[in-house]
Amino acid sequence: DIQMTQSPASLSASVGDRVTITCQASQDIKKYVNWFQQKPGKAPKLLMYDTSNLGTGVPSRFSGSGSGTHFTFTISSLQPEDIATYYCHQYDDVPRTFGQGTKVEIK
Amino acid sequence: EVQLVESGGGLVKPGESLRLSCTGSGFDFSRAYMTWVRQAPGKGLEWVGRIKGKTDGETIDYAAPVKGRFTISRDDSKNMFYLQMNSLKTEDTAVYYCLFRWDSWGQGTLVTVSS
């Protein structure tokens, strides 16, 4: 199975800060990475697909990059509504696998 | 508009069975790859399995922890997607989500396995 190692597990940042989350795959997954945002009690929401494409209606302060085994997700200017847990996810092979999640809080 | 609605969750004892259902609308159901993802309380997301669409042979894949105990199926005539869960364990306690693609999720249904 492909392991997705996501870091950090949690972070605290101020409104307006740049926030970066990384995900390392255990093998080459080309560009087949999604990033999800999940707020408490809600289903996850797709933010990025194919590493760097914004989901429908997703603000442009969110971005993604990477290929192969190293992937990065960035919030260019953290907003209060971005408080959530973020997950990377690979869909290059089955079983599909997720990172452990990053909980983002406001400092 | 794509809509997915799960049902069938509840409280069961270890070793018992439960069947989850998911009804979909707003898309070509028979061609759709349908997926189950679960989330244990306070934990991360875990892929359970998926069934491909009719044109791709309805192939089914499962995650290792559920293979041999869970069965995924579909009834395209009813736009329904199922997860039959047998020999349930306490570690199967989770919210179960059905998905169409990765941008359309149901609201989730809670399965609690406890004696």
Image (spheres, coloured by chain):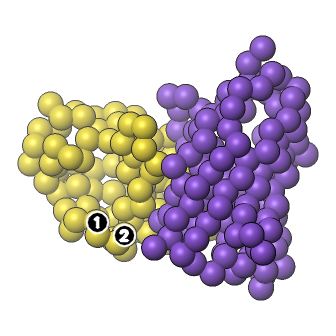
Chain colours: A yellow, B purple
Q: How crowded is mark 1: few (under 14 residues within 10 Å), some or many (20 or more)?
A: some
Left or right, A25 with reference to A67: right
Whether B109 is drawn above or below A20: the answer is above
- What is the x, y in percent for residue B79? 70, 70
Give the camera-side residue of B48 and B71.
Answer: B71
Mark 1 vs mark 2, CA separation in Å = 5 Å
The residue most toward the top is: B115
Residue B54: percent from left, percent from top = 79, 80
Relative vertical location of residue B85 with respect to residue B5 in this rendering, above or below? above
Q: Is residue B14 at all visible to an observer of this figure?
A: yes
Q: Mark 1 points at which residue?
A: A58
Dot 2: element: loop
Q: In which quarter of the image is residue A95?
A: bottom right
Q: Quadrant of the C terminus of chain B?
A: top right
Left of B91 or right of it: where is B69? right
Relative height, residue B56 to residue A67 (above, below):
below
Chain for disc number 1: A
Tell whether label 2 touches label 1 (CB within 8 Å). Answer: yes
Q: Which mark is residue A37?
A: none
Which residue was labeled with disc 2?
A55
Q: In the image, residue A90 lies at what x, y percent?
A: 56, 60
Q: Is residue B67 above or below residue B29?
A: above
Q: What element carries label 1?
A: loop
